[in-house]
Amino acid sequence: MIIRKGQAEIERIAKAGALVAETIAHVGERLEPGLTTLELDRIADAFIRSHGGVPTSQGYKGYPRAICISVDDVVVHGIPDDTVVDDGSIVTIDVGVTLGGAIADSAYTFAVGAIDPESQRLLHTCQDALAAGIAEARLGNRIGDISRAVQTVVEGAGFSVVKSLVGHGVGRHYHEDPHVPNFGEPGRGPRLSEGMTIAIEPMITMGKPDVFLAEDGWTIATSDGSLAAHFEHTVAILPDGPRILTPRVGIAVERESLAALSPRASA
Ligand code: MF3
Ligand code: CO
């Protein structure tokens, strides 16, 4: 069942979304070679709680940390631990915050120091794919229109979409209907209607699309060891277009493809 939200609830999700965006920027500022992902998790946890929020991931289906941190070939759900962040690595910071009873969810893959051009292209492509998906998040369209737009950008750049991981409704619960796949057929799937709030989140790889679940029961990494990127926004479907409820701030700079969407999209 898809839960459509009214104006007041969407504003609450936007407040949670602002804290999500600030948390991502705050962790991004602290990202430097030599830190462990657990240290970064503690920084995120303290930041979220000091702003009145609760990290939604903590305790979700038994998940043990405040946020997910996925390094290099880890696609999603990396559990912060004693992994040291290296110069030249790519690090996804995936944050869910509950604030005032509302939940928002966003992710950003940071480059640590200088990365090679192909890795940079992977990050840019994932952002462009997210932008293309959000641009299709309009009344009258269907989920498949978002899915296909994401897929076209990713595969057009020669990269792969992970098919076993999908975006999702979000707002009242961390994961609501509908699923938002990153591949599909235009004109198919649930119709987009006013007040839907969805997390659109391309998860893409430089090599093959196959992934595996690690023995910890959470970490999902590429089977071929290739690099993976993940960018995510929580978006509301409104009469005047998509509204990003987790607009970037600070060091997590939005790429032009996304900033260039209707003013509404980044308002
Ligand atoms: N933020 C993640 C998502 O987009 C949710 C992670 S669930 C957790 O789906 F328990 F691993 F945190
Ligand atoms: Co999500």
Image (spheres, rainbow, N blue to C red):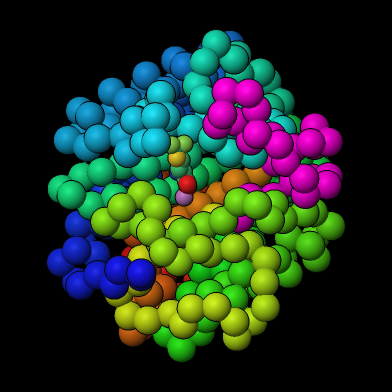
Instruction: Decide: is 224 above or below 84.
Output: below
The answer to whether 57 appears left or right of 184 in the picture is left
Q: Residue at x 66, y 18 (%)?
A: 86
| Nearest to the observer: residue 261 or residue 104 | 104
User: Where does the magenta region start and end?
Assistant: 202-228
Q: Is residue 127 magenta?
A: no
Percent x, y of residue 224: 83, 36
Residue found at x 60% / y 85%:
187
Asked if the stretch drawn in magenta spans residue 205, the answer is: yes
Residue 4, image x and y in percent?
Answer: 29, 72
Residue 231 at x, y percent in the picture: 56, 50
Q: In the image, 69: left or right of 128?
A: left
Rendering coords of residue 244 (x, y %): 39, 63
Name the residue nearer the viewer: 139 or 218: 218
Q: Residue furthest bottom?
A: 140
| Quadrant assignment, res 234 | bottom left
When the figure is inspected, residue 256 is found, relative to residue 36, above or below; the finding is below
User: Could you tell me which residue is drawn at 20 percent across and 72 percent down?
Assistant: 6
* Image quadrant in which the N terminus is located: bottom left
